[in-house]
Image (tube, rainbow, N blue to C red):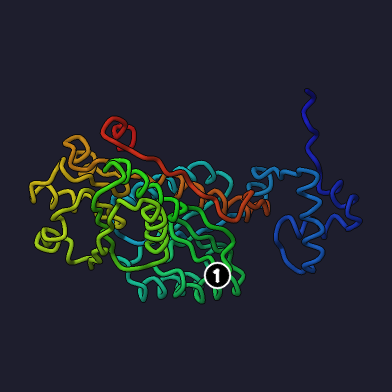
Amino acid sequence: MKPKKRLTVKEIAEEVGLSVATVDRVLNNRGNVKPKTVELVMNKVREMEYTPNLSASFLSKGRSISLAVAYPELPAYFWNQVETGIDAAVREFRDFGLQVHTIRSKDYDLTDQKKTMLQLVDSGEYDAIAISPNDPQEMTDVIDHAVSCNLTVGTFNSDSPLSSRMFYVGCDYRVAGRLAADTLCRLTGRRGRIGLIMSYTNFQMQQKVTGFREVIGNYPEIQLRAPLKVDQEEYTSFETFAEYFEGLDGVYVASAKLHIIAEHLEKAGLAGRVALIGHDMNEEIHDSLQRDVVTATICQDPFNQGYLIVKSLFEYLSSRKLPDTRENITKLELVTKENARYYI
């Protein structure tokens, strides 16, 4: 098959009946172009499958794209895995002018994250911001403010769907909750008593619990005990969980504390007797899987959450290429002791 000829800006200009200078301003985001003109050009670009020569464009003009990527400090093991994806994207695109600055907000402190976001916007140093919002509703106004200041904003890991963000990269947490419930019901023979452990309620947690309850409701012989809602500082207390474990056949940990709950379950002498399922992977979870304390865990593709948000923002800023969908849903994978080695 004969390869397609690379299109030129001049050819696109001829197709839409505009000057080369106007099309060039649209493609390089230089402003001073009417929104209808931008739409006309970008529709034609997609139709003609135009792909700019990023290397020539950026390196010859000495341009760079600067991204800020903001996310919580904890759980450190999860965000370290996300960061490996961010680093991979930086290595891939840095020769095309990409610069990335990562910022970890304190714990899940909403005030600290809002302050950090506003500082990033006010600095004027960035073309785009990627953020994992601690509270999607509370962060909506801050994200909208950033967009009003002509910054492109993408969310990852946690979404803010009512905001003006450009796109989201991360899991469908309702499906994650459904997968956890389906697995736990199968492990308990679709009958028995099941517990649910969760932390503070945010959008991600709400979606997991909603999906979990949807599936549990389909099994009349499954009894769901009232969820145990635990503050971050309470997880270290064995007494908080010992009474809750009594009489349960299975437990779902919706928070990022599976490894800690595994320790408490083992201390209670229930390892291997109570099915335990949660999310993510670290050394402690891997060890608990091998010793049959944790029955299964659901991994949420942290590498690609970091990689794809940086890649998507870079491609949009460099060539106005949008992802195929405004919600890039990463895969969920059920991990047991037999395949755990591939996820550590």
What amino acid does circle 1 point to? Ser
Identify the residue shown where x is 59% and y is 61%: 166
Q: Quadrant of the C terminus?
A: top left
Q: Quadrant of the N terminus?
A: top right
Kindly identify which residue carries mark 1.
Answer: 163
Q: Nearer the viewer, residue 189 or 85?
A: 189
Q: Is residue 62 visible?
A: no
Q: Is residue 8 above or below residue 22?
A: above
Q: Nearer the viewer, residue 293 or 50?
A: 293
Identify the residue shown where x is 18% and y is 61%: 235
Q: Is residue 314 visible?
A: yes
Q: Pointer 1: residues within 10 angstroms few (<14), some, or many (20+)?
A: some
List x then y, in percent, for residue 340: 29, 34
List x then y, in percent, for residue 27: 73, 55
Horizontally, is 283 left or right of 216 in the view?
A: left
Q: Residue at the front extreme?
A: 220
Residue at disc 1, secondary structure = loop
Identify the residue shown where x is 68% and y is 48%: 57
Identify the residue shown where x is 28% and y is 61%: 198
List x then y, in percent, for residue 210: 41, 60
Q: Nearer the viewer, residue 55 or 7?
A: 7
Q: Residue at the top extreme?
A: 1
Q: Quadrant of residue 116?
A: bottom left
List x then y, in percent, for residue 23: 81, 56
Horizontally, is 232 left or right of 177 in the view?
A: left
Q: Is residue 216 above or below residue 151?
A: above
